[in-house]
Image: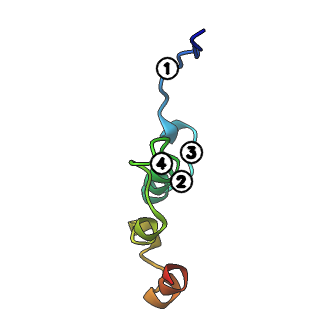
Amino acid sequence: MKATFPKFRPVNPANYFKNFEPAALDLLLKMIALDPARRISMKEALRHPYFDELGEAQKQIFLR
């Protein structure tokens, strides 16, 4: 017996996260990608423009 799943129409995430700045929304979407090959890694996430204000010393704490 083959499982079937309902089909959903895609939605624009920006409609649901209206208060997010563009960099935050971009990072969020990269972090929740269902395909692991397309999902952002922790190291890549720390290099994302959203974290530009974070100092290099602070980033290094997470990269150890």
Q: Nearer the viewer, mark 2 or mark 1?
A: 1
| Label annotation for residue 20 | 2
Q: Is residue 54 left or right of residue 48?
A: right
Verify CB contact (< 8 Å) between mark 2 and mark 3. yes
Residue 20 against residue 53 in the figure, above or below: above
Residue, disc 1: 9
| Label annotation for residue 17 | 3
* C-alpha gap between disc 2 and disc 3: 6 Å
* C-alpha gap between disc 2 and disc 1: 23 Å
Residue, disc 4: 29
Indicate the position of residue 55 as horizontal and vertical percent values. 46, 86
* C-alpha gap between disc 2 and disc 4: 12 Å
| Circle 4 crowding by C-alpha within 10 Å: few under 14, some 14–19, many from 20 | few
Question: Which amino acid does the dot numbered 4 rest on?
Answer: Leu
| Circle 2 crowding by C-alpha within 10 Å: few under 14, some 14–19, many from 20 | few
Indicate the position of residue 17 as horizontal and vertical percent values. 56, 45
Q: Which one is earlier in the sequence, the residue at label 1 or at label 3? A: 1
* C-alpha gap between disc 1 and disc 4: 17 Å
Q: Which one is earlier in the sequence, the residue at label 2 or at label 4? A: 2
Q: Which one is earlier in the sequence, the residue at label 4 or at label 3? A: 3
